[in-house]
Image (tube, helix red, strand yellow):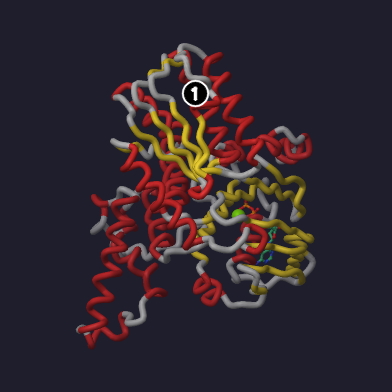
């Protein structure tokens, strides 16, 4: 280790909500050195009592293979517990490849930049996006209060409540029939709850219709894919844009002036999404011909095309193989990072969501049986029993 103390390598830029971590010239030979460094980081952040963006300097830093597992684990833990987003710079080739492959398997965004200036710019951009998508305080963002939902004699949800904070990945998990999809349907306005309230940005929106909820900035994907199978990827994504269009297809006859310009803007945004989700090669393919995993990705693309503040995803990884699941998890995290989209994710398989969630709610038989950080929930005996009980 170099002569500078660890504490001296951590700088808080309060006005930019940024914690700068300087790994320059350091060599991590084993787990112990990693633990030592991150213990100091955790302690400093603990004192601050807030979440931070990370600006990380890797110039001349090397991480030996023996240290990588600890390095990735502590980095991920920092991101989940108090990170708002990360940018990295000065990364050499070896470290870069390791970061990229860990980003792939541990599901975080690599965000590597050549210089500190480029990283700082990207960070400013990230903060701006987060601010425009989530200006309201955590308390007043999305609040679900005491939801009761009955279908005849069946109680699908029994007094379930929770708060979703802006910018987080919020997961609802639970065994079959737990009420997860029902909850998403209530949040999206598809079901009207028997009682209870839903507040969004301080407004009561319990009784709004689906399209009104969409206009407020909610987009969703479905447990069973709901795409236009005969239409191309591109056209399916464009349908997600309809809501945003003042001059929509009905005014095609007036294809000049403002309508044309608006059309161009929409196409540009859609192209950005296509690049972002790496679906360029299938843009013209009718979605009915695509493999299942890609159809799921197109559905995500269509939802993102609505530029939602809140993205509601009902089992986006169901029926996928491990690689497809990892890809999907990465895209969800990237969308969360890149567009500042708050994500409410439903998942049956507990292991899938643990790596990518900030907060988890567990439902069982329509009742909330636990909630907390992924670690808290994972180790909760009540949760373990609910999952074992499903046979
Ligand atoms: N439209 C409906 N009419 C009647 N009962 C319903 C309706 N929708 C859901 N239910 C019932 O509510 C309960 C919860 O179902 P829900 O689909 O929300 O569970 P889930 O957690 O999404 O399950 P899965 O993991 O199988 O998708 C079930 O008992 C279901 O039969
Ligand atoms: Mg469901």
Question: Is residue 52 rendered to the left or right of residue 379?
Answer: left
Q: How many marks?
A: 1
Q: Residue 201 versus residue 128: which sits nearer the camera? A: 128
Q: Say which quarter of the image contains residue 232.
A: bottom left
Residue farthest to the left, as pictured: 256
Q: Residue 252 versus residue 23: which sits nearer the camera? A: 23
Q: Residue 98 versus residue 207: which sits nearer the camera? A: 98
Residue 292, position as x, y percentages in the image: 40, 49
In this picture, is 169 found above or below 21?
below
Which structural element holds mark 1? helix
Residue 79, position as x, y percentages in the image: 53, 38
Question: Is residue 41 rendered to the left or right of residue 365?
Answer: left
Which residue in the structure is indicated by mark 1? Answer: 71
Is the CB atom of the residue marked by disc 1 within 8 angstroms of ligand 1's nearest atom?
Answer: no
Instruction: Look at 58% across and 67% down and name the residue there.
Output: 188
In this picture, is 276 found above or below 88?
below
Tell me if I can see residue 159 in this picture: yes
Residue 267, position as x, y percentages in the image: 27, 67
Q: Residue 111 versus residue 51: which sits nearer the camera? A: 51
Question: Is residue 309 rendered to the left or right of residue 230?
Answer: right
Question: Is residue 239 rendered to the left or right of residue 163?
Answer: left
């Amino acid at each position: 280790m170099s002569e500078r103390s660890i504490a001296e390598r951590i700088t808080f830029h309060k006005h930019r909500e940024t914690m700068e971590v300087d790994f320059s010239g350091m060599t991590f030979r084993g787990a112990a050195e990693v633990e030592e460094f991150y213990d100091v980081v955790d302690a400093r952040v603990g004192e601050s009592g807030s979440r931070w963006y990370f600006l990380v300097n890797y110039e001349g830093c090397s991480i030996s293979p023996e240290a990588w597992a600890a390095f990735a684990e502590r980095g991920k833990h920092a991101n989940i517990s108090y990170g708002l987003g990360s940018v990295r710079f000065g990364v050499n080739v070896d470290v870069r490849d390791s970061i990229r492959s860990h980003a792939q398997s541990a599901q975080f965004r690599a965000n590597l930049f050549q210089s500190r200036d480029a990283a700082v710019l990207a960070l400013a951009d990230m903060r701006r996006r987060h601010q425009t998508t989530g200006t309201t305080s955590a308390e007043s963002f999305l609040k679900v209060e005491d939801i009761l939902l009955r279908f005849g004699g069946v109680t699908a949800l029994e007094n379930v409540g929770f708060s979703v904070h802006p910018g987080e990945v919020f997961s609802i998990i639970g065994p079959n029939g737990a009420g997860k999809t029902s909850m998403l349907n209530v949040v999206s306005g598809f079901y009207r709850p028997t009682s209870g309230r839903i507040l969004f940005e301080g407004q009561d929106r319990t009784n709004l219709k689906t399209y009104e909820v969409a206009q407020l900035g909610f987009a969703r994907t479905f447990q069973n894919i709901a795409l236009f199978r005969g239409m191309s990827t591109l056209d399916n994504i464009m349908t997600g844009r309809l809501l945003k269009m003042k001059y929509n297809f009905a005014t095609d006859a007036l294809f000049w002036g403002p309508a044309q310009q608006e059309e161009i803007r929409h196409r540009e945004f859609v192209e950005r999404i296509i690049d972002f989700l790496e679906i360029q090669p299938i843009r013209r393919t009718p979605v009915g011909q695509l493999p299942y995993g890609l159809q799921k990705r197109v559905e995500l693309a269509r939802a993102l095309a609505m530029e939602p503040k809140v993205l509601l995803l009902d089992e986006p990884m169901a029926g996928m193989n491990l690689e497809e699941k990892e890809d999907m998890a990465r895209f969800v995290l990237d969308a969360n990072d890149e567009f500042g989209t708050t994500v409410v994710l439903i998942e049956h398989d507990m292991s899938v969501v643990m790596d990518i969630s900030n907060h988890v709610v567990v439902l069982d038989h329509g009742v909330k049986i636990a909630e907390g950080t992924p670690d808290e929930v994972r180790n909760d005996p009540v949760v373990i029993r609910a999952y074992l009980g499903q046979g």
